[in-house]
Amino acid sequence: MFELTNEEAIQLINIGVSQSVIPSGYNIGASKIFAFSEQGVSMLSSVLRSKTAIDINISIMRAFVALRQYAFGYAELSQRLETFMLETNMQFNEVYQALTELASIKELEDKPRKRVGFVQDKEE
């Protein structure tokens, strides 16, 4: 079990109030807020003996497992997104280079050229 900092407590209260876990209007300075780590919850289960306490403990442990799986999935998804971004940036870079070359070729084609052959002045 560990004590939360004021910033962590504020974040927890903001999340908790929106999920109706912590009552609105809770005063942070009124009492210290403590939290259990996953290991703390498992140690607590060895002390608790009532059926309700055991059921709640199992639910909390399942929540920790789900949170860990979510975090792992998020990390994997983040890595895949990063790889995708790098690949698409390289592809867009190649497209940009090709467009730049085409624009420069078009610019050369549009340049006024000297006339070839007999040129007659129009001063007559």
Image (cartoon, rainbow, N blue to C red):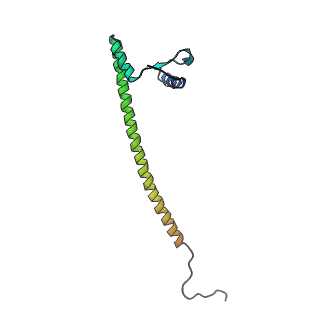
Q: Position of residue 50 (x, y in %)?
A: 33, 10
Q: Relative to 110, does residue 9 appear above or below in the rendering?
A: above
Q: Relative to 61, does residue 94 appear above or below in the rendering?
A: below
Q: Residue at x 39, y 29 (%)?
A: 67
Q: Residue 15: in sight, yes or no?
A: yes
Q: Residue lying farthest right?
A: 123
Q: Residue at x 33, y 19 (%)?
A: 58
In the depicted view, which residue is nearer to us: 14 or 78?
A: 78
In the depicted view, which residue is nearer to us: 61 or 46?
A: 46
Q: Residue at x 54, y 84 (%)?
A: 116
Could you tell me which quadrant the N terminus lies in?
top left
Q: Relative to 100, does residue 56 appear above or below in the rendering?
A: above
Q: Residue at x 54, y 26 (%)?
A: 7
Q: Residue lying farthest top?
A: 50
Q: Position of residue 84 (x, y in %)?
A: 40, 48
Could you tell me which quadrant the C terminus lies in?
bottom right
Picture quadrant where residue 70 is located: top left
Q: Position of residue 53 (x, y in %)?
A: 36, 13
Q: How many marks?
A: 0
Q: Residue 21: in sight, yes or no?
A: no
Q: Position of residue 82 (x, y in %)?
A: 42, 45
